[in-house]
Image: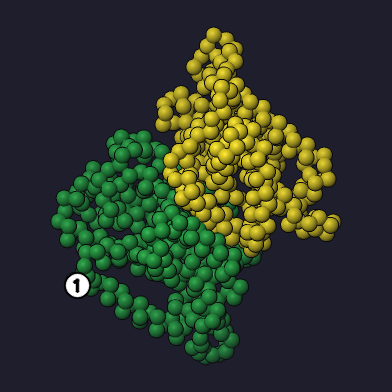
Amino acid sequence: MEWVNAVLQGALLGGVYALLATGLSLVFGVMRIVNLAQGDLTILAAFVAVSVVQLTGLGPIEALALVVPLMMGLGYVLQRGLLDHSLGRGVLPPVLVTFGLAIVIQNLLLSIYTADTRGLNAGAIETDSIRLSPEIAIGVLPLLTLIVAVAILVGLQLLLSRTGLGRALRATSDDAQTATLMGIDDRRMFAIAMAIALGTVAVAGVFLGIRTSFGPVDGPARLIFAFEAVIIGGLGSLWGTLIGGIMLGVAQGIGNQLGPAYPVLAGHLLFLLVLAFRPQGLFARRQERQS
Amino acid sequence: MSGPTVVMGTRASRRAAILGLASVALLATVPAWGSAGMMRFLVEVLTLLALAQMWNLLAGYAGLVSIGQQAFIGLGAYGLFVLTDLALLPAVLPVVGVGLLGAAVSLAVSPLVFRLAGGYFAIGTWVVAEVIRLVVLNTPQVGGGTGVTVQALVAMPAAERQALTYWLALMVGIGSIVVVALIMRSRLGLALSGLRDSEVAARSLGVDIFRAKLFIFLIAGVGCAVAGAVIYMQLLRIQPNAAFGIDWTARMMFVVIIGGVGRIEGPIVGVAAFFLLQQTLAELGTLYLVILGGVAIFVTLLAPGGLWGLITSRYPVALFGIQRRLLLGPARPIEATPANPGGSP
């Protein structure tokens, strides 16, 4: 029964990983860049939530109403002011610029908030649980996290498939040059994609921050989880990403059951196995590899 | 004799070679007169130079942006411990053994990470480094989370150990430049230059891209492992989180970006700039790293050729005879043309 619990807990956590992965693959899909600073931006969102909670006295979940728009604005500005200039000159500049950005954010957080780990306290909701059977209980918070994650993914899917903005984003993703010919401002689409990505990631950052304590140097781990969920699920599919995130969460849950040292390692191993035996991902929409 | 000929050397490169040999000779005499502090500093400089040359080879020439090279540094450190303290080999042999370890591991992980391209390759190499770190962290035989101290080296007389470390660092530092120069003068170097300028064009001319990249990944794995072993011969205390820390790769990247990506002179200029910045700004603590990251961003965006690119755009010199120039008509010595004017690799 302990095992069932571990798998269940992991699966619930998977929603957060799916959100992180969505941020990464949305930016990659539209701009063809991998945002190496995304992990540190996730942690930044959690720290912004800490400050918002301190200043306003709101709970961390209510604070999202402020944190998400802030991070979206930051995403828009970052793309327009910085990342745009690294595009169109090969693979190297975006990687170097986002890596430099990661170092800047991480060390700014260290100097503002010190190296202490922080937590976000959501109150009673953290310990409430729903009992399914005498041995199995589902925490209200993990369940809420998964529901929020799925809701955001559904919303994104609708935005991309049903709205004019979504059509423009998809057109830019397919072929930015041709999209420009049709009157789409590709740079604006890039900035909007980055804003959506950081908004998504901010939600994940805050929920992860409620779940476990975090520090300024935890960004890289967030980036790696996002990346693993993307590769496990397969590029180019939001639902694949959700399943990738859930599988990563389950692997970590099982690893946790083996011992405190293994959750992260178990996730890495699942990723390596997928990469070795099914490099297109488990639920890839397209067979060929995008690069 | 008339007709087109290909020339690689320039007058400047021959002068630079003489100057280079003179500086190597000078560096070789340091153990006779230099202070212990100076030798320690030079070991740091020379090993960072070697690491940066390897990273430049990867990212600048082969288009392999690895942010997992710390895997090889950590393996070099732990290889040093295992071979000196557990296998009891005399001091130089472990460094050779560590090189073989680096080769074996880079060959073993390449089928996995080579499935990823660009930025995803970068994170893939990082995950591999993390996996190795976590495995080492959970192996009590090599000290687990607390790490180990290389006892056989601690037991050595300090002066002897320092001289040995210095010699090895000198060999690694100078060796890295020689290896890169030799590669660039070879057929593979020609392929790599093509790869750097346009992967599609290189492929269409029959360059076996996969093999070229694999070879470079292998060389970089060996180089980083050997440099890691030498670094830890000096540090002696190995902790998994430090030995496998991303900081190593951040440092190599910074040196290469500042100096000039895709140029052999880049890492040399970059190491000088790095230590200059470190001496002047180190007391700023974390703000120093903020500045370092900011500098890296702005150099990438505004001066993609780095410091060396800025220098050569004004004074077209090539310190190494590794650039091929086609001379129509009789061979005659001419000066180099500015390499890669736009500067973007």
- Which residue is denoted by mark 1 in the rendering? B33
Rate crowding at label 1 as few (under 14), some (14 to 19) or many (20 or more) other CA atoms within 10 Å. Answer: few
**Residue B53 appears left or right of B39:** right
x 21%, y 67%: residue: B35
Please, is residue A290 above or below residue A1 in the view? below
Is residue B119 visible in the rendered image? The answer is yes
Across and down, in percent, residue B265 comes to 45, 72
Chain corresponding to green in the figure: B
Q: In the figure, residue A46 lies in which quadrant?
A: top right
* Image point (56%, 15%), residue name: A137
Q: Residue B256 appears at what percent x and percent y?
A: 47, 64
Is residue A19 visible from the viewing direction of this image? no
- In the depicted structure, whether residue B114 falls above or below residue A122: below
Q: Is residue B342 above or below residue A277?
A: below
Q: Amino acid at mark 1?
A: Trp
**Chain letter of the residue carrying label 1:** B
Which chain appears yellow? A
* Left or right position of B17 against A7: left
Residue B92 drawn at (x, y percent): 24, 56
Q: Is residue A49 above or below residue B221?
A: above
Is disc 1 placed on a helix, strand or loop?
helix
Residue visible at 67% across and 30% down in the picture: A148
